[in-house]
Image (cartoon, grey):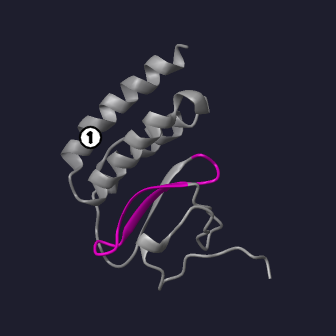
Amino acid sequence: MSGKKYVDKNTKFSEVTVGMYFSDESRVEKKYFYDNVKNYIIFLNQNKEITYRIRGEEESSLNKVKKLALVNGELNLIPNLFRKDLNLQMAYIYKLAILKDSDSAEKMLELLENGITSRKKY
């Protein structure tokens, strides 16, 4: 047995801790937001990417937020030293989109994109 602790369908997102794995081998490095009722979790994985999981039939506005994946990809090009607060902003944007507030998510995404651009200059 590998000793890895996996998140299964019966694990509440409030019970997910750093070091646990999802079935796709994404390891939780930091947990940002979760809700057991709305069935989502947003976390930093071992590749230093902000990602999420949603359970059930809950429809989100993630696909309505233009450039979300693009900006998340750009975020990964920033050195770790300059990325901590930007990761939190990206996690919050995911939360807004999951909670169907795509207008606010779009506005926050634009601010984040500006922050990424300014940090790339250094």
Q: What is the three-letter code of the residue carrying label 1?
A: Glu
Q: Answer with left or right where residue 85 lies relative to residue 59.
A: right
Task: Say what secondary structure mark 1 lies in.
Answer: helix
Q: Give how far across and how far down residue 44 sits, in percent.
A: 53, 52
Residue to which mark 1 is pinned: 106
Q: Residue at x 39, y 75 (%)?
A: 55
Q: Residue at x 29, y 73 (%)?
A: 58
Highlighted range, magenta: 30-48
Q: Quadrant of the N terminus?
A: bottom right
Q: Answer with left or right where residue 26 lies relative to residue 50.
A: right
Query: What number of labels is visible?
Result: 1
Per the image, is 22 magenta? no
Closest to the observer: 105 or 14? 14
Q: Residue furthest top?
A: 121
What crowding class fits label 1: few (fewer than 14 Cα within 10 Å), some (14-19), or many (20 or more)?
A: some
Q: Determine whether 53 is above or below 74 in the image.
A: below
Q: Give how far across and how far down residue 60 sits, in percent.
A: 29, 63
Q: Residue at x 31, y 47 (%)?
A: 65
Q: Determine whether 122 is above or below 1 in the image.
A: above
Per the image, is 33 magenta? yes
Q: Residue furthest bottom?
A: 10
Closest to the observer: 57 or 35? 35
Q: Determine whether 111 is above or below 15 in the image.
A: above
Q: Answer with left or right where residue 37 lies relative to residue 103.
A: right
Q: Residue at x 19, y 44 (%)?
A: 103
